[in-house]
Image: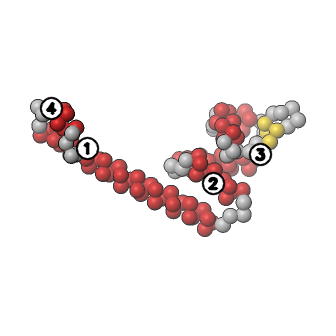
């Protein structure tokens, strides 16, 4: 199928398709007239890309998944990558909780001291 139909089926823009090709995530082939053509396999690849993107994976990380997808990799290799990403996400959640606590303390200080100077709150140990 050509890029227009592929774009409609995958529900992504032609620009995204071209970008994924440029980044090595998607490998469409070309006809003699230089038109891009795609198979059902590429539809599954785009579905995988979208799924991983929606799960917080970067394009760099997605590329490594696609390398596994194209090879005879075992689920254990995928599991390791997923577990590593989960650790990164858990660390980020901890960081965000800490930031949230600091912001809540600063907000409470503002509520308790509405006439206090702004710079005193910013320079406090809460932020």
Disc 2 secondary structure class: helix
Disc 1 secondary structure class: loop
The quarter of the displayed image where residue 74 is located: bottom right
As drawn, 95 above or below 16: below
> Measured from the top left, where is residue 113 in percent x and y?
11, 37
Name the mark on residue 127: 1
Which quarter of the image is occupied by the N terminus? top right
Q: Nearer the viewer, mark 3 or mark 1?
A: 1
- Residue at label 4? 117
- Residue at label 3? 39
Disc 4 secondary structure class: loop
Question: Reading the chain from its start, which is encountered first: label 3 or label 2?
Answer: 3
Which quarter of the image is occupied by the C terminus? top left
As drawn, 74 above or below 115: below
Q: Mark 4 packing: few (<14 Cα in 10 Å), some, or many (20+)?
A: few
Q: CA distance from mark 1 to mark 2?
A: 37 Å
Q: CB of mark 4 within 8 Å of CB of mark 1? A: no
Q: CA distance from mark 3 to mark 2?
A: 21 Å
Q: CA distance from mark 3 to mark 1?
A: 53 Å
> Measured from the top left, where is residue 59 in percent x and y?
59, 46
Disc 3 secondary structure class: loop
Q: Residue, x 51% and y 62% (percent of image)?
A: 83
How many dots with numbers? 4
Q: Mark 2 packing: few (<14 Cα in 10 Å), some, or many (20+)?
A: some
In the image, taking residue 17 as reference, residue 61 lies left or right, namely left
Q: Residue, x 48% and y 59% (percent of image)?
A: 86
Question: Reading the chain from its start, which is encountered first: label 3 or label 1?
Answer: 3
Question: Reading the chain from its start, which is encountered first: label 1 or label 2?
Answer: 2
Q: Residue, x 80% and y 42% (percent of image)?
A: 29
Name the mark on residue 64: 2
As drawn, 51 above or below 14: below
């Amino acid at each position: 199928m050509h890029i227009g139909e592929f774009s409609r089926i995958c529900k992504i823009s032609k620009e995204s398709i071209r970008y994924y090709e440029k980044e090595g995530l998607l490998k469409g082939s070309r006809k003699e007239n230089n038109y891009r053509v795609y198979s059902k396999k590429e539809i599954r690849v785009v579905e995988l890309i979208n799924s991983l993107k929606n799960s917080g994976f970067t394009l760099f990380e997605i590329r490594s998944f696609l390398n596994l997808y194209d090879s005879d990799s075992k689920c254990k290799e995928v599991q390791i990558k997923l577990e590593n990403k989960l650790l990164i996400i858990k660390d980020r959640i901890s960081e965000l909780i800490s930031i949230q606590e600091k912001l809540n303390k600063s907000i409470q200080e503002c509520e308790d001291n509405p006439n206090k100077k702004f710079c005193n709150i910013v320079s406090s140990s809460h932020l």
